[in-house]
Image (cartoon, rainbow, N blue to C red):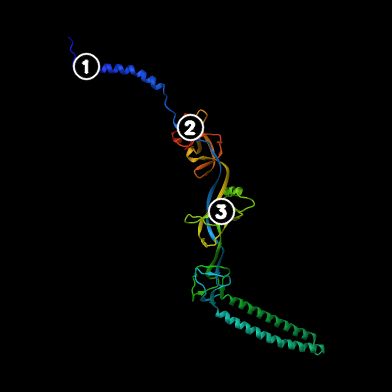
Amino acid sequence: MLTLTRTDTARAIATALLASGLWLLPACQRDASSHPPASPTFPVASPKLADTFYEREFVGEVHAARYAEVRSRLKGVVDALAVDEGQRVKAGQLLFTLSARELQQELLKARAGTKSAEAELKLLRLERDNTRMLFEKKVVSEAEMALAESKLDALDARVDESKANEIQIGVSLGYAKVRAPFDGVINRIPRKVGSVVAEDDLLTTIADASEVLVYFRVSEREYLELNGAASETQPKQVSLRLADGTLHPHAGTVDAVESEVSRDTGNLSFRARFPNPNGTLKHGSSGKVVIKTEVPSALLVPQSSTFEVQGRLFVYAVDGNSTTRAKEFVSKLRVGDSFVVASGLSEQDRFIVAGVQKVKEGMRIDAVPPS
């Protein structure tokens, strides 16, 4: 009788299991080959045709439409201030009074000189009349008569000169009363009462910012693009983004363009005019001029659908057999999160919208509409 040990029993069981596994393996393989793996699913769409727009921003400097430096036109002392800093004034309103005692004395002297010359002129006219009477009676010669006339003419000219000098001093003395050139707001007053001022010293500045001018610089290329997009009959509408990121509530218009391109920067200076009825914009402040350009019938491709290879843009196009292939296209510009197609794609093309990083060339996919 044959007796089996535990070792022999284990070996027999293992051999039986191996044999059964080898027998089942071809069946499993046959079953797996009859059910091929499913194709991966990706959302697929076509380029979207729509009217859109894009915005460009340019740093601008804000200037009051009317701004003036108020300067002293004579030498003197500030006698009185009629206004305060930040005060709104009217055209012709008194701002400063300057002391001009020297000019006052000169004016008195000029008036006295004029009166003296006029009195002398009267006397000389009497003498001329007497000389004429004697000349008519042939008592004096023609030369004496001519001399009397020339003396009278010379004195008459001196009287006119004295009067002109008097008027000039009076005009200069009028500069002691400094008045506002237009309606506006007074800014800093650096020279207070008692300050000595010389001719052309700055007294203050005045700004009328009910309307402002914003100057900004544009490259030559951008200028040509803007010029092509602008209407020939209507000024270009613009907006102004303030320092806090908000938009100025009133739209502006570009009403002037510099006639020369800067050789140093290659830029042109533009000027935009904005209403400022509430005085929000101040002279010397800054902002960003926003120019909105319409793009009609633009062919749009989401940026997330694209990939870049050596600076060239591609999408994974899907053909009628649901097979992928990389297709290059040229972008005209970027609008928000989409590219505007210049060439390479049409409305009939279909491409993978999302998950392009998981796609390979020639892959078969299961195309579904984007969610």
Q: Residue furthest right?
A: 137
Q: Earlier in the sequence, mark 1 or mark 3?
A: 1
> Hey, what amino acid is under mark 2?
Ala
Tell whether label 2 touches label 3 (CB within 8 Å): no
10 Å neighbourhood of mark 1: few (<14), some, or many (≥20)? Answer: few
Which residue in the protein does label 3 denote? 238
Say the numbered circle drawn on residue 367: 2
Q: Position of residue 302 (x, y in %)?
A: 50, 40
Q: Position of residue 184 (x, y in %)?
A: 55, 67
Q: Nearer the viewer, residue 313 or 194?
A: 313
Residue at point 53% right, 40% down? 300
Q: Is residue 331 above or below residue 136?
A: above
- Where disc 3 sits, the SS reads strand
10 Å neighbourhood of mark 3: few (<14), some, or many (≥20)? Answer: many
Residue at point 28% right, 18% down? 17
Q: Earlier in the sequence, mark 2 or mark 1?
A: 1
> Hey, what amino acid is under mark 1?
Thr
10 Å neighbourhood of mark 2: few (<14), some, or many (≥20)? Answer: some
- Separation of residues labelled 2 and 1 (CA atoms): 57 Å
Q: Residue 112 occupies which quadrant of the picture?
A: bottom right
- Where disc 1 sits, the SS reads helix
- Separation of residues labelled 3 and 2 (CA atoms): 44 Å
Q: Earlier in the sequence, mark 3 or mark 2?
A: 3
> Hey, what amino acid is under mark 3?
Val
Q: Residue furthest top?
A: 1
Residue at point 58% right, 81% down? 104
Q: Is residue 153 above or below residue 181?
A: below
Q: Is residue 66 above or below residue 305?
A: below
- Where disc 2 sits, the SS reads strand
Indicate left or right for 109 with 2 as reference: right
Q: Position of residue 242 (x, y in %)?
A: 50, 56
Say the numbered circle drawn on residue 9: 1
